Image: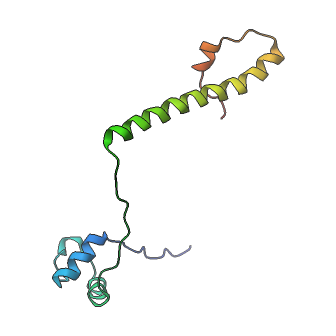
């Protein structure tokens, strides 16, 4: 039976920054951060963090989300047609595009 490797814990960069700023390795005792970890943070200092600056308002994000949902629905309908139309050509039966658009993708 293979041995499980111990998992490596990771912490939010702001916790490390606060520990370094205060110099208190026990400031977050409730998180049970090992003493060796906080000691290395204090000796090495805080790291530079690169983050994403969010310049979008929620309305534009929701609008884009709706546009993408509609686009996905159109593409799903096209895929359904591309899957079913060749089948229909072989069976020589009539295609009902409205019923076809609401049919689940079988096997895709």
Where's residue 101, x and y in %?
60, 20
Where's residue 35, x and y in %?
26, 85
Q: Is residue 76 above or below residue 53?
A: above
Q: Residue furthest right?
A: 90
Horizontal side of residue 84 vs 28, given as left or right: right
Horizontal side of residue 26 vs 102, given as left or right: left
What count of labels does the image hold? Answer: 0
> Which of the 4 image quarters holds residue 10?
bottom left
**Residue in the image at 21% along x and 79% along y:** 19
**Residue in the image at 19% along x and 81% along y:** 21
The residue lying toward the viewer, choosing from 77 and 6, is 77
Q: Residue furthest front?
A: 55
Q: Residue furthest top?
A: 94
The residue lying toward the viewer, choosing from 30 and 21, is 21
Horizontal side of residue 30 vs 41, given as left or right: left
The residue lying toward the viewer, choosing from 39 and 49, is 49
Query: Where is the N terminus found, in terms of image quarters?
Result: bottom right
**Residue in the image at 33% along x and 37% along y:** 59
Query: Where is the C terminus found, in terms of image quarters?
Result: top right
> Which of the 4 image quarters holds residue 77?
top right
> Which of the 4 image quarters holds residue 48?
bottom left
Q: Is residue 23 above or below residue 82?
A: below
The colour scheme applied to this rendered structure is: rainbow
Q: Is residue 76 above or below residue 101?
A: below
**Residue in the image at 30% along x and 87% along y:** 36
Where's residue 38, x and y in %?
26, 83
Where's residue 97, x and y in %?
64, 14
């Amino acid at each position: 039976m293979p041995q499980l490797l111990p998992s490596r814990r990771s912490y939010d960069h702001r916790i490390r920054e606060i520990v370094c700023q205060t110099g208190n390795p026990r400031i977050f005792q409730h998180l049970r951060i090992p003493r060796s970890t906080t000691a290395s943070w204090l000796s090495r200092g805080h790291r530079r963090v690169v983050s994403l600056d969010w310049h979008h308002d929620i309305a534009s994000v929701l609008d884009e989300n709706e546009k993408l949902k509609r686009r996905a629905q159109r593409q799903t309908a096209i895929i359904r047609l591309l899957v079913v139309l060749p089948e229909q050509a072989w069976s020589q039966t009539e295609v009902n595009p409205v019923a076809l658009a609401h049919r689940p993708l079988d096997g895709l």
